[in-house]
Image: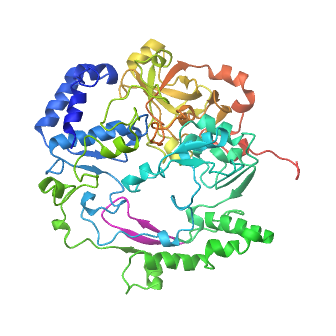
Amino acid sequence: MGFENFRHYVLGGEDGVPKTPKWAERICGVPSYTIKALARYWAAHAVSIAHCNGGSFIRSCFAHEPARLEVALLGMQGVGKPGANQFKFMEWTLFGIPTLDPLPPSVHIPSLGAAYRGYVTGTKASFIPKTMIPEAIMNPPVQWYGHIAAGFPREDQFDGPYTFPPEGGSRIHMVWSDSPCWETCWNGGFKMQDALRHESIECVVVQHPWMENDTLFADIILPSNTKFETEDIGTDCDSGQWNVVFYERQAIQPIGESKSDKEVVAEVARALEQYGGVYEGMLDKYLGGKTDDEWIKVGFETSGVPEDLTFEEFKERQYYAFPTREDWKDIPAGIRQFHDDPEGHPLRTPSGKLEYYSTTLSRYFPDDRERGPIPHWIDEGAGHQERQYLERGRKYPFLLVSNHPHFRVHAQHDDVTWFREIETCKVTGPDGYKYEPVWVNPVDAGKLGLSTGDVVKVYNERGAVLGGVIVTERIMPGAVYQDHGARCDTVVLGEGGLDRGGANNLIAPTATTSKNAHGEVTSGFLVNIEKVDVFALAEQYPEAFGRDYEPDCGLVATARVVDGKEGE
């Protein structure tokens, strides 16, 4: 539906500029003959598209446009026919759609939601998208649409507008975090550092096992423990054919005074009860009068396991794997049924058809120039000018590519000694510090006088991070590559600051994906790079460069802990 509108745009009907390979060459740096060859190969074959959650592809400004263009291209292939589909390499059963599982699915996709004691998106009237927290703290009110979470119905993105603070409500005066890694995992991290120190914030409480990242801004740290120190129940329903419910036995006793995240919240609830009023019975409201073992049993009994398997048998066995559906061969692949019979098996769009012209976007956001009814290439918008050929690209000529790292899970495992022994995990600088690698193409390295092992500053107007150079042809000229999620080792705090650890989310844009789409922008943004003298920086910032540090694991806890008398 609406293909003629799309065709009109591509052939230049809207702006007089046909979207030819030569037009694209200037934008993406790929020669037009390569684009033509890819297009001809694509058109001559049945082509499917597979992702592993998209990586930086979905974490850049206007990232919804290439995603929509993928679907447009698949539609031109006859999406749903054999060999022309779209699927993920992980979390295959995350959204409970058996036809999108590339392996034979199991008879049931288990859920432990009934036993979960944490926050669930969409259950509270007052909430803030995680990408908008700094703005909500420092520049309220903020406004947005939808609950900003994967898996919600398509229509949810048009709910709203929501506003924080809500009418008659207060701005934020306290932050309590059980995931204190915002500044190196989300967008505009230096601004988050400013937000956590903003005059409106009277108290910051963090529960965490480690002294790292946002934890360093806390007034009170409640030590939580790891999975090894608790009894629990879990599932593996995101990454393969076998949907498993497993019993997690406690491996070691809790370290020091640490408690599980649930116990930490329970202790706070217990302490609040003394104030009565809304706090009366707070502990029972939270835990429902159940012990840990009883909540584990609730999870087991509601997970979907067969009725003839007892809880005690499950605990003894420690797992249950759901068998494969017997009719798995009869399950159509992808959206084959839509391809074969679009009227009988419609899509979840308003029309039931593949919409090149989005009737819903046209109705809800008729003036949105960044996410219009037809997928477009967007040069710039109100919140972003991140194209090299635009004016800002003269000052910041490199495009920073930042993916999920090989040697971490986001920001976890940055201190694993075995990983740090791998040559490409970190680059050892002349001062012995292990810097987060920055890949630079030999062409650019030659122009900038860079060699492997040099330390560079990667920067824009939002601030700077350091990194260790690896000269390699694995990154194209005009782009530099540095993984996201390095542990923060901030030398100068806040916007315009400097981080030694290479946590490049700190210099990512604060603005979200686009005007009415509030995802993170943590890749594909403009920077410049230049070689730095780390010894000169050490003289300029002796305290920051003199923190306790072990190359085998990075910053150690004593880097942030000082001796003092009680009450000081």
Q: Indicate whether residue 234 is drawn in magenta.
A: yes
Residue positioned 62% across, 34% down in the render: 190
- Res 169 seen here: yes
Give residue 284's position: percent from left, percent from top. Answer: 66, 76
Q: Is residue 503 above or below residue 123?
A: above
On the image, which quarter does residue 9 sit in? top left
Residue positioned 34% across, 46% down in the render: 360
Q: Indicate whether residue 230 is drawn in magenta.
A: no
Magenta stretch?
A: 233-249
Q: Is residue 482 above or below residue 355?
A: above
Give residue 29's position: percent from left, percent from top. Answer: 32, 22
Is 470 situated left or right of 180 in this image? left
Task: Out of 16 and 302, give the one closest to the viewer.
Answer: 16
- Res 212 seen here: no
Give residue 376's position: percent from left, percent from top. Answer: 32, 32
Residue positioned 28% across, 23% down in the render: 24
The quadrant the N terminus occupies is top left
Q: Is residue 166 above or below residue 455?
A: below
Q: How is the image coloured?
A: rainbow
Q: Is residue 22 above or below residue 171?
A: above
Give residue 122's position: percent from left, percent from top. Answer: 51, 59
Give the number of marks: 0
Is 223 situated left or right of 159 in this image? right
